[in-house]
Image (tube, rainbow, N blue to C red):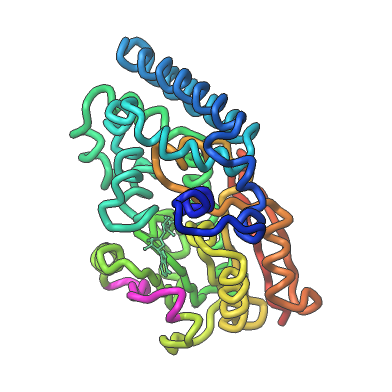
Amino acid sequence: MNQVQIAFDGESLITPELIAADGRAIDGHPQSEQFATARVQLGLVMNIARQRLEAGTAPAAAVGYLLETLHDMRRALDPAVWQELIPLAQDHPIAALIHQDPLTQRSFEKPRGYSGDAGLLDLIYRHPDAAETVAQSTALGQAIYDYTSHAPSCVAARERIEILARHVDAVTAARGGDSEILTIAAGHLREAELSSALQGGQIKRWVALDQDPLSVGLVARNHAGSCIEAMPGSVRGLLGNAYGIGTFDFIYAAGLYDYLPERVAVRLTQKCLEMLKPNGVFLFANFHVDMLDAAYMETLANWPLILRSEEDVWNIMRSSVDMNTVDAEVELGANRNMVYGIVTKRG
Ligand SMILES: C[S@@+](CC[C@H](N)C(=O)[O-])C[C@H]1O[C@@H](n2cnc3c(N)ncnc32)[C@H](O)[C@@H]1O
């Protein structure tokens, strides 16, 4: 239940603490002027996009208009007002059209019970394993998918697996082969398909850990007989030293920090640095605070993320380790929708 509902449920006392808890509750109240105006604007935008989709002439342009206009609204509005708009956007009849797109639909429905499962990532990657799902979609759904799967976040995510594979290969080359790698929240470990070090048999051990048994099973099947060890496990297990998996030359997490509050992100970073060998590298990726399709994702895809700036990533690293003992850098992906924190432990 959000702050505003608590305040006006007739039971709870409206206290300064309650108002201050969010810091935005007054402005964000549904009856505020800003909310009233924004709700009308949202309805207009959604209706225009719906008419364009129903006309069927240029579905990509219609979704593009929607995505960009929602982005502008999200950026301009008080964050609490934007939060109040999200359920209204999700209830709009345009959802029946937009959710013909298999990507937006899977994100919204969450068939595995949580956001961002590896099957959804396969749709984002336009991976061959997702082709049948796309082919079974309506013509409108496929046209929308052609747009959404090329949205900035998806482009950034596709680049991310290339970057990860490059790091695996570089770390392996730097230590002359026999590298040991740990992937946290591995999903389907699609970056492994891009790693020449893996194909060349230069990796000693690649532990791919994920909490979803279906994803772990797929990785185990796809990489049977290789150095890849698919392993069921969670962040909580790692933090509690539950696995006894040793130390690594390269540890990374992609598609995970976007769900972790700073406190947990710091604890996980500390744990990963403990598990690094001297000269080992730790990398984490996070969608960037200026991600252009965040508003679309939060509304029609029902996929809120913790977006971070370069400074947020520096703060996680600074809070995790004595910076005199590591070499640290923060990098942006090519379209600036993804930010990477990279820490090398000095030997
Ligand atoms: C967005 S996907 C990213 C998958 C993969 N790393 C990639 O980039 O394609 C998020 C993954 O994190 C896993 N996950 C989420 N929370 C987790 C946790 N607490 N411990 C381990 N895995 C987790 C999910 O099962 C899912 O496979």
Residue 282 vs 97, above or below: the answer is below
Residue located at (56% from left, 74% from top) = 268
Image quadrant holding the N terminus, namely bottom left
Residue 57 occupies which quadrant of the picture?
top left
Q: Is residue 216 among the parts visible in the rendering?
A: yes
Residue 276 occupies which quadrant of the picture?
bottom right
Residue 303 vs 47, above or below: the answer is below
Left or right of 252 in this view: 343: right
Q: Which of these two is toward me, 140 or 77?
A: 77
Residue located at (57% from left, 38% from top) = 81
What x and y, as percent, mark residue 198? Answer: 42, 65
Ligand 1 is found in the corner quadrant, namely bottom left
Region rendered in magenta:
225-237
Left or right of 124 in this view: 182: right
Q: Is residue 226 magenta?
A: yes
What x and y, as percent, mark residue 117? Answer: 35, 55
Q: Is residue 162 among the parts visible in the rendering?
A: no
Image quadrant holding the C terminus, namely bottom right
Left or right of 137 in this view: 48: right
Q: Is residue 279 magenta?
A: no
Residue 233 vs 193, above or below: the answer is below
Total marks shown come to 0
What x and y, as percent, mark residue 132? Answer: 21, 40
Residue located at (27% from left, 73% from top) = 225
Q: Which of these two is toward me, 205 or 41?
A: 41
Q: In the displayed image of the protein, which residue is found farthest to the right?
A: 324
What x and y, as percent, mark residue 56? Answer: 31, 13
Residue located at (51% from left, 75% from top) = 179
Q: Which of these two is toward me, 25 or 336?
A: 25
Q: Which of these two is toward me, 267 or 171?
A: 267
